[in-house]
């Protein structure tokens, strides 16, 4: 199944990252360039690095100048993340371009890649919640509370994986169709962000 492979790749990325635990480490994508597996690896790597940047910026003792640098890095990462989602959707658009759509076909609330985006983030939540479950420097009550949360996250992963599989089956059968909207992010665009274009005048 597609999601079984995707979850395996996401876990691989997270394990690869935590061998170094360094937001500046340069990782080599082990999958063939241009393949869907390579896209999935790169997508989760962006998410994983950003997860840890978000942790760093929440340090109450961080130097404000350093925090600003990281905030701008996170903004750039969000742009890359959105680009990666569009790349993955392009793969599915091409894969299903010859599917005959049923007259009563419906559009889904989100594209396959945006659902995959949530699956990628979910893999990170599961990893880090598990780390809380196995901590030895906290009370058992903390571990028990985190285990309940982990159980919920794992159930959510099953449900989301099932929903993605069903969506792909529906698209392949023509029962649903894909429609993508190119990103409309405004904060990075100097022609749309009033702070940016005001400074150009």
Image: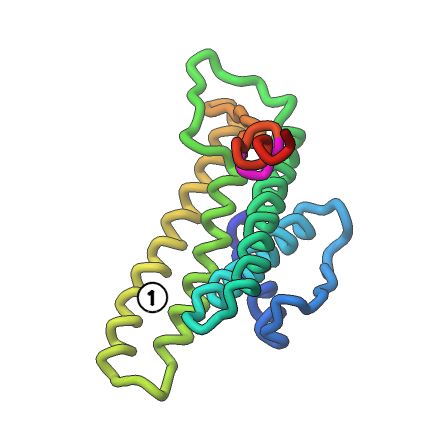
Count the marks: how many? 1
Residue carrying label 1: 150
Relative to 127, 85 lies left or right? right
The residue most toward the left is 141
Is 132 located above or below residue 184 in the figure? below
Viewer-side residue, 163 vs 184: 184
Viewer-side residue, 109 vs 8: 109
Rendering quarter of residue 47: bottom right
Secondary element at tag 1: helix
Question: Which region of the structure is painted magenta?
Answer: 186-190
Q: Residue at x 62, y 72 (%)?
A: 22
Is 74 located above or below residue 107 in the figure? below
> Can residue 89 be spotted in the picture?
no
Viewer-side residue, 110 vs 98: 110
Q: Residue at x 59, y 65 (%)?
A: 12
> Can residue 147 be spotted in the picture?
yes
Magenta-span inclusion, residue 188: yes
């Amino acid at each position: 199944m597609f999601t079984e492979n995707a979850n395996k790749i996401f876990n691989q990325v997270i394990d690869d990252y935590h061998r170094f635990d360094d937001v500046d480490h340069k990782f080599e994508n082990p999958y063939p360039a241009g393949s869907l597996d390579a896209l999935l690896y790169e997508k989760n790597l962006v998410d994983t690095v950003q997860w840890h940047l978000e942790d760093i910026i929440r340090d109450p003792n961080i130097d404000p100048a350093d925090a600003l640098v990281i905030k701008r890095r996170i903004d750039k990462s969000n742009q890359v993340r959105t680009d990666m989602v569009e790349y993955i959707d392009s793969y599915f658009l091409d894969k299903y371009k010859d599917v005959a759509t049923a007259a009563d076909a419906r559009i889904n609330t989100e594209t396959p890649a945006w659902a995959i985006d949530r699956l990628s983030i979910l893999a990170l939540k599961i990893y880090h919640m598990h780390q809380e479950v196995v901590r030895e420097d906290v009370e058992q009550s903390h571990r028990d509370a985190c285990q309940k949360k982990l159980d919920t996250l794992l159930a959510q992963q099953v449900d989301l994986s099932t929903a993605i599989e069903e969506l792909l089956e529906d698209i392949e059968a023509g029962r649903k169709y894909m429609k993508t909207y190119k990103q409309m992010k405004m904060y990075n665009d100097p022609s749309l962000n009033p702070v940016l274009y005001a400074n150009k005048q």
